[in-house]
Amino acid sequence: MRTLKWKWLIIVIVTVLALWQLHYSYVYFRMTQEQKENIDPLVLKKIASRALHLGLDLKGGMHIVLQIDKSKLKPEEQQGALDRALEIIRNRVDQFGVSEPVIQKQGTDRILVQLPGVINKERAQEIIGKTALLEFKLVADPDVFSKTVSAIDEYLKNTYGDTVSLSGFFVGQDNSVEVDYKPVVDKFLNDPEVKKLIPYGYEFLWGKPVVREGYTTVSLYLVKSEPLLTGDAILDAVPGVGTPSNPSGVKVELTMTRRASGKWAMITGANIGKRIAIVLDDIVQSAPVVRERIPNGRSLIEMGNSSVEDAKALAIILKAGALPAPLKIVEERTIGPALGLDSIKAGARSFVIGSIVVLLFMLIYYMVAGAIADLALILNILYLLAILSAFRATLTMPGIAGIILTVGMAVDANVLIFERLREELKGGKTFRTALEAAYTRVFTTIFDANATTFIAAIILYWFGTGPVKGFAVTLSIGLVASFFTALFVTRTVMETISLKNIKSLKMLQFFKNSNIDFLRRRKIAYYVSLGLIILSVVALVINKGPRYGVDFTGGYLLEVSYEKNVDTEVIRKALMDIGFKDATIQRYTGTNIFLIKVKESEPEVMDEIKSTLKSLGKDSKVEFPREELVGPAVSKGLQVRALWVVFLGMIGILIYVTIRFTFRFGVASVIALFHDVFITLGIITLMGKELTIPMIAALLTILGYSINDSIVISDRIRENLKLMRRDNFDTVVNRSLNSTLGRTIITSLTTIFVLLALYLFGGRVIHDFSFALLIGVVVGTYSSIFVVASIVVDWEHKKPTRRR
């Protein structure tokens, strides 16, 4: 009794923490744009940072991969070119105020840039396309800065009230402003009357963000508008440690070109004791004090308490202005906010419908036990969303699909428990004893089943890209959450019920005393599998392999939405007239939205096609909800990565099953996995579906689902081999298949329920994804019953491992 109280306390604490974490999402997503603009920036940042983080496919934005053209750089200039380009882009993205951007290196010559909320291609080009501009500008004397700020303060107080002033935003002694208040200060500084108060020939510039005591601040500088020197004056910049005033202080040694050295000597000689700002694209990177005249062009920038990493970053910036590396867009994907909103609505709708169907089914079939399972499912979703929110994991559309699939698969653990409880009660045990035995015996089964799916999810995350990683994250967290709710939450509820001297729980049963001889029909199953494999081979041969999407072939894909009706043939003719006779045009049923694909992958192609399509709309509204451009190099790399994902998934599962069971079960399971994936691939090819990155995610999920079924049956075979020592191998396997038949069918049904909801109501973005999963679940259910067991039995007949 005391143990139960502690268990209930843990459940209540975890649930309250989850609700507390999710209330931030509830508050944030209910706020209007006007409310967000009027709320204190620090409060808004706190709420947004703890709310669910939506991916580009849900909130809209751009995904761009840039490649550095090193061919125009000298060999000595190529070293560090990627770091310099990365720093330039990061500096510009910060300057344009893009919320939560992703800027990171890919390989040795590519940079990934994700810009949430930015769907204007011209603005993106402005951010990443122009040449870096590095300048040296003289910082205004402190008294000039002070007088200017005082004049602005006076104006703001007279205009907005006594509580408003520019100096009121400053924190510390270096005129820093908390980054969340920067937009407010910018608004004041851009006031035409405030601009008149700035001394002639001067301008305000912001410094780069600095984190101090947990707060991010930016310094405000008043500098001369006219630069003293530009970036082409720099020959080299080297970070180091050890300055004349501090042996352990960090520094940057700056070398000017021979031509600029004389001018630099004049500048430093005339400004001893003053500060010179190093400005990259209108952002002050550093503002060192001139200590003495520098006659030889070799300067030493002392960086005080800064770190070595800060010195390296400054050196990169200084060299970036001198050695710009040309950047080329090799992959670009754009999701408009309207499509993102549609995806959220469609995902939520399919989620609610699928969940309700599963909850009702469990309630009707398992009655009281079903109500307990429903509670576990609701808590499972609650914990999953809370963990996603707490760890700032990105929720994508495939991620929503992962959540919905988790609902279907989480039922499996509860079904295993209830079916085992039914068997134990049927054997004459008391309710408490049967309950203990049921949870003890299903633990290893649930653990093994979840572990193999988890292996598939980890491999998918490690090798996947973009939204696919979101799917892997939600699936992984969902598995952990379902493990906790099934084995801890439901057990606690069941143990509490057992205290009331309940002798049994009423449940429906589809398969009473099932005694089907599955193995006698295994030859028929072999022929069925062979027929499906031949059909898949024919489909793949006729189509010369899978119907690869833009992800794998390279090219340009876009969706165009017309306000008024436009005929498909009109679009086809217009594209043929500008040279795209092989363009693929598909109209979404019942809409004026078209999906268009061309093989060309140059950025210029996008502008020409969009201009032509816009002209067909005449005076009506024309929108482009989605755009994707993938270069040939990127698509080739994705093909190789996709093959590795599936291959490593199978190898990982083979190793795990071999360790946990036997090599025979491992080989049989992998053959079944290949069987399921190949047939699914053949059917989606036959149905004209394209193989894309999300479809690869679907295939790997099928691996996890199929092995989940196989492990449940294999675990029962292993158990029965110990209990039924006098029976022959075929009898043991048949008994095991019949014992788990109810669980296999019910789990498949609940998973199919949610996948049907996803397929019918999930929207066009994941329509093909859910179709592939539907096919895979049906084929996987069939193979777990007929393929794995049949292979193991025939292997046993040829090379027996036990007496029959």
Image (cartoon, rainbow, N blue to C red):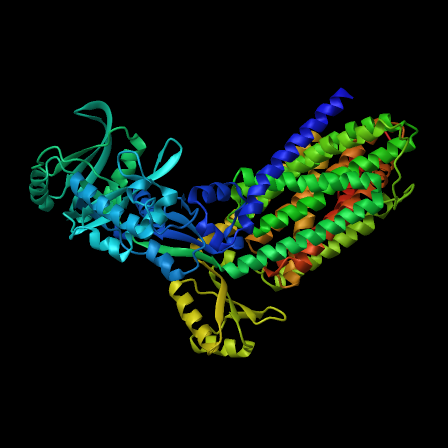
Q: Count numbered badges in the picture.
A: 0
Residue 752 appears in view: no
Up-down relation of residue 186 to residue 419 (above or below): below
Q: Image quadrant for the C terminus?
A: top right
Residue 246 horizontal/vertical position (percent) = 21, 23
- Residue 214 lies left or right of residue 793; in this view the side is left
Looking at the rendering, in which quadrant would you find the N terminus? top right
Is 465 located above or below residue 390 in the figure?
below
Picture coordinates of residue 312, whole percent (x, y): 28, 35
Q: Nearer the viewer, residue 645 or 229?
A: 229
With respect to residue 530, does 80 lie above or below? Answer: above
**Viewer-nearest residue: 363 or 323:** 363
**Front position in the image: 675 or 488:** 488
Residue extending farthest to the top is: 2
Q: Which residue is drawn at 21% across and 55% down?
A: 196
Q: Where does the image place residue 41, in percent across and percent down from the top left?
A: 42, 45
Quarter of the rendering containing residue 472:
top right
The residue depicted at 8 percent of the width and 45 percent of the height is: 263
Q: In this view, does 686 lie to the left or right of 390?
A: right
For the point 80% across and 41% down, which residue is it?
370
- Percent position of residue 154, x then y: 25, 47
Q: Which sits in the foreground, 36 or 701? A: 36
- In the image, taking residue 256 as reference, residue 162 lies left or right, namely right
User: Can residue 116 be seen from the camera position used here?
Assistant: yes
